[in-house]
Amino acid sequence: MRKRQQNHIICFILTILLLSMNIQVFAGTVVHVTKMNLNKAIDILTVGGTDTLKATIAPTNATNKAVRWTSSNATIAKVDGNGKVTSLKVGTATITVTTADKALKATCKVTVNPVVHVSKVSLNKTKDILTVGGTDTLKATITPTNATNKAVKWTSSNATIAKVDGNGKVIAVKAGTSTITVSTVDGSKKTTCIVTVSNPIINVTSVSLNKTIGNLTIGETDNLLASVNPTNANNKAVNWTSSNSAIAKVDSLGKVTTIGAGTAIITVTTANGSKKATYTVTVNNKKGYVYNTELQINLKVRSAPNLSGAILGYLYNYNKIEILATIVDSSNNVWDKIIYKNGFAYVSDAYIQRYTTPPANIVSIARVITKQFEVGTSNQVVGDFDNEGLSLGYLQWCIGQSTLQPILNRMDIEYNAEMKSIFGTNYNIMHSMILDTPVNQLKWAKSINNSTKNIINPWYLQFGNLCTNQDFKNIEADAEVYTVKQAMLICDNYKLKSVRGFALAFDIAVQNGSISANAAKIINTALVKTPSITEKNLLVVIANAVADSSTTNSEDVRSRKIAIVNGNGIVHGLMFNLVGLSDSYWR
């Protein structure tokens, strides 16, 4: 028992000793505050404003960092235990912070000013134009400049068109119009900017025309079509001008109207980028030729546009003229003004056939091709093999189609002595035949054929001599205008524009006279079925339609026409490579 008590006493004494030692250790680790600072010594607030002061204790490992905050005038500016200062009224107050350890102090002088309210807000622009994807930053100006609260809010009337962020940055989203509004937090003052958003600007890179050259007569028109590239360019507007409006004028839609003879250049210019394309038009006087079915009557050339005008001379079938003007006299007779023997003269319009023609080089290509098919190197005298009775010359003018009679008549009138010399004792028969009826003319022509449908002598030799006569050749050259007109009727009817198209039409005019009703029906059916058919494919349709509807020699007709379409082929058993043909447009 005694021993247990001794142990308890020893433990108590040891506990006392340990506690004493621990108190001394702890007392030796206290770190006192040596310095304190505030983050600001002066602060300026407006009534109702707040600010939090921050006290910094040194050293940073001070044992007791507790502080106490006080205000010299809490009615002006009060402070809470965390250093948050709240301004209450205009005036000055000193905020003091005191450390619990050592009572060190730091102060901040707080000046409280009155609130300055916003009176107005304005923007650097009231209208803005952007393209989709574009941006712009609007700038708001607060009045007065010393306003207490300059905070603003930004809104868009249609954010799907133009949206705006908190800094006034506008982003264009899609085409349209949106109103951007800036509002002040103080006083809700507002102003707006109307933003118009358009699709991205796509500039014009080029412009082209549906044709670059034209060959017209006075009074004709042509329609030009301008194609602006790229097709989605924003501004496709174009302007049209003429280099000489006295020759050809052009309207705002590209319609060209010819005024006088000469050459003019029509220019189309894009409004965007000033890109240009041109069309050169050659304007000729109206063309015509004499065509009088009354072969015994020649066309009188008069000094005045009436029946009282003096007779200056005569014109004959296929004489070509340029028509300078057309005049109607008091009796409603129509007269054409022409150049005759270096002066002005007048002829009755009733005996004039107007026509248009491709450039001479295009006609020449067609002539050479058809001449190869018609006569090759023969003497150009052909009998009744195609039921036309008699065909003569390099384009095989024939009795059956009544194309030879006007040529023979003109030769007989203008060069009568030569006709008598060529035909000798047969002249009177020839002269009478020329003025006979078409039925009797064909009957006579067939009568001078033998059983193999070849022209018998001496007619064969006489017609051969006629074909080599230069005056007859000149008349033939004039008469070619008849074929050109018939070919142009075909071209106009089917809107053929290429060199190849004219050559085919020319050959049809010579060999077939025209496109028959049956052929036209076949062609029109094809056009209805395929309205967008290319010209080259249309020529194939025309060639076969003419051949299929031909009553004689249909395969001969086909071989000629298809050779023109292809540029080569076998005709009459011979291989032809046709020179000059192309699919280029001449008009």
Image: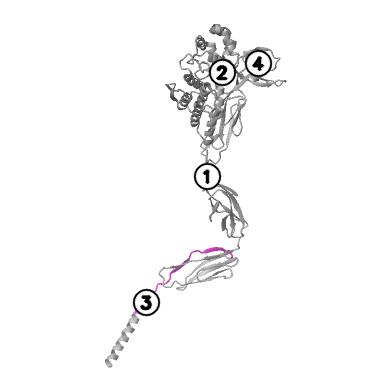
Image point (57%, 57%), residue name: 152
- Residue 89 visible in the current orientation: yes
- Residue 415 visible in the current orientation: no
Query: Label 3: how many residues lie within 10 Å, few (<14), some (14-19) or many (20+)?
Result: few
Nearer-N-terminus badge (2/4): 4
Quadrant housing residue 578: top left
State the CA–CA distance, disc 3 to disc 4: 142 Å
Q: Quadrant of the C terminus?
A: top right
Please tell me whether mark 2 or mark 1 is closer to you in this view. Answer: 2
Query: Label 4: how many residues lie within 10 Å, few (<14), some (14-19) or many (20+)?
Result: many
- Tell me the element at label 4: strand
- Give residue 345's mark: 4
Q: Which residue is mark 1?
A: 200
Q: Which residue is mark 2?
A: 403
Q: Position of residue 563 (x, y in %)?
A: 45, 25
Q: Name the one closer to the observer, 393 or 352.
A: 393
Give the magenta-colored segment's residue range: 22-47
Judge from the rendering whether residue 175 lies leftward or rightward of residue 55; answer left or right. Answer: right
State the CA–CA distance, disc 2 to disc 4: 28 Å
Q: Amino acid at mark 3?
A: Phe
Question: Does residue 7 lie above or below 151 as drawn?
Answer: below
- Tell me the element at label 3: helix
State the CA–CA distance, disc 2 to disc 1: 66 Å
Query: Label 1: how many residues lie within 10 Å, few (<14), some (14-19) or many (20+)?
Result: some
Q: Which residue is mark 3?
A: 26
Q: Amino acid at mark 2?
A: Thr
Nearer-N-terminus badge (3/4): 3
Q: Amino acid at mark 4?
A: Ala
The reply to whether callout 3 and callout 4 are in contact (CB within 8 Å) is no
Q: Name the one closer to the observer, 533 or 570.
A: 570
